[in-house]
Image (spheres, helix red, strand yellow):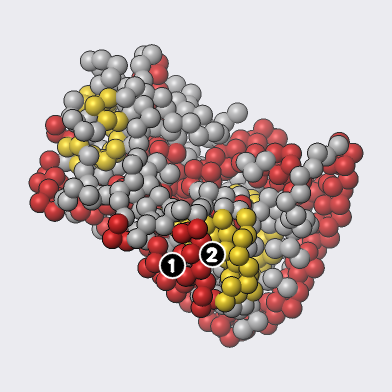
Amino acid sequence: MTYCPSPYFYRRRQTREVVVGDPARGGVVIGGDHPVVIQSMITCDTMDTAACVRQTLELVAVGCQIVRITAPTVKDAANLKHIVAELRARGCRVPIVADIHFKPEAAMEAAQWVEMVRVNPGNYADKKKFAVKEYTAAEYAAELERLEEQFTPLVLRCQQLGRALRIGTNHGSLSDRIMNRFGDTPLGMVESALEFARIARRHDFHNFKFSMKSSNPKVMIECYRLLVARLDGLGPDWNYPIHLGVTEAGEGEDGRIKSAIGIGSLLCDGLGDTIRVSLTEDSPREIEVCRDLLAQIPRLTVGPLKRAIESTFPFDPFRFERRGTPEIELSETTHCGGQQPARVVVTRAAWDKLAPRIRPRDDVKPEAIYEELNVCEVDPLEDFTVNCATQLVTVKDEVDLPAIAAFRLLAAQLRRRGTNNPILLKDCLEFDPVPLEPKIALLRASAVIGALLADGIGDAILVRSESGAGQSLRLAYNILQAAGCRSFKTDYVACPSCGRTLFNLQTITARIKARTDHLKGVKIAIMGCIVNGPGEMADADFGYVGGAPGKINLYVGKTAVKFNIPEDEAVERLVDLVKEHGKWVEPELAVAPTT
């Protein structure tokens, strides 16, 4: 079972075409040989027709090709008629997608007015009760029959009206039925989506795509890989397009890094037909990031290799496991490999600029100087020898491979030789004649190093595409945090806002960060509503979630513990909750993490 022909060269996955709207009148065709399509979502109240039209036009003006609008109720879904009519009257033909959770009747209404309907299998026909139950075969079959009764009318309506569907599972909102049989796992996400796909196919409806979204880039990558492998195993006519996205990625550099790790890794392996970068920022900012990320893929990939190499994977594509290595010494005070966290290496030139500014208690500081390491530089396309099993190994510059393929091949070559030397990752193996813009260097480094870390490869990292010494150091640490390899600061899961959001996400996120951004190793989820499920906060310590207009619910992990707190009190009540659980440190007393 595999998800791409080879981990070493690029070949885009061939899919059937899905038509969204009338291509002759501004619609788009997804999949096939068509370019990857960029989409986003407006953030205003769906009942505010003027605001919805304005935000949609703003997105289209900067290059958005599909716009999603939430429809939480039948009333909201009915107002899509007026939104779409006004857009068309203004000459805007961009396809509109209705985002549906919980209410099949809203989906049925929305399908009359928009070109695509997105349903979440975890909550379309199921009310999540967190019930623990062992299903008999008959009980499980009865659940599937109930699901078919609920979903079939929408399939038939979409078929009749020429609409498209997106079957979009979320890591945080799997149904109780799926949770009890498969757990909160990538397999559960895939099986949940396939239940709905089978119903569509029984009615000979094929105009749909899949998505598998998570706020954790590693989980997201595993889900999509498994989905594609399962689709391939089901037969050549299961070649449906897929939409890529890291949900609740957050804002600023962190949101861009998480998205580049998840989306970039999969694009480099030839997967993905539509993408969205979900940022807790104004939606038009997402489009620039999408375009910039797509533009990097040709530089980060290679076509069929000039010489044959084995296509076996040097890692398990469907279950994260860090590659096992011996622990070695980088310096008198720092080790890497083994159970040590991935270390941050800098060049001598960067060290000379950084050294005067480093303080003993700084969390972000170089841990080794590249030129002083006992590192073996090799070309993985050629035969090579390593001095000993504990020597640090890396790919030398200017090899005839892009970085992701080169380091995967290095891991494979070492395994073939029966050695497991620690590997130093580089974000680039050649340099552009003109230094990259910081935003481009961030995306490239995140996609390359993040993809390899998600494969379980890498014991130390070296970022060189960012020319600023301080910026490259910070970027290295941010990539490690986003990939789940280090925790040197507070981690935030923040949704991008939509018409369901019950508070101003950008304002509240800034307020929460101002009070908590010194809590190293603590993870806080900031969710405008609970539509994607508390499971999206599965690995968060605390959650700040919109419960009703002006009211906030606070979570510890997946469990709601404080309800209906007035919004003007909620940030301080969150701080109190952190204190109650022994995770609070006063800002002036904050210390670096022990890892």
* Count of numbered tags: 2
Q: Residue 179 vs residue 14: left or right?
A: right
Q: What residue appears at the point 45 percent right and 25 percent down from the top-left corner?
A: 314
Counting from the top left corner in percent of width and height, residue 276 is at: 51, 59
Q: Residue 578 vs residue 127: left or right?
A: left
Within-10-Å neighbours for mark 2: few <14, some 14–19, many 20+: many
Counting from the top left corner in percent of width and height, residue 228 is at: 60, 39
Question: What residue sits right under mark 1 in the picture?
Answer: 512
Quick one: label 1 or label 2, which is nearer the N terminus? 1
Q: What residue appears at the point 65 percent right and 81 percent down from the top-left corner?
A: 47
Counting from the top left corner in percent of width and height, residue 213 is at: 57, 52
Amino acid type, label 2: Tyr
Image quarter for residue 123? bottom right
- Marks 1/2: CA distance? 9 Å
Question: Is residue 436 shown above or below 280?
Answer: above
Question: What residue sits right under mark 2 in the picture?
Answer: 544
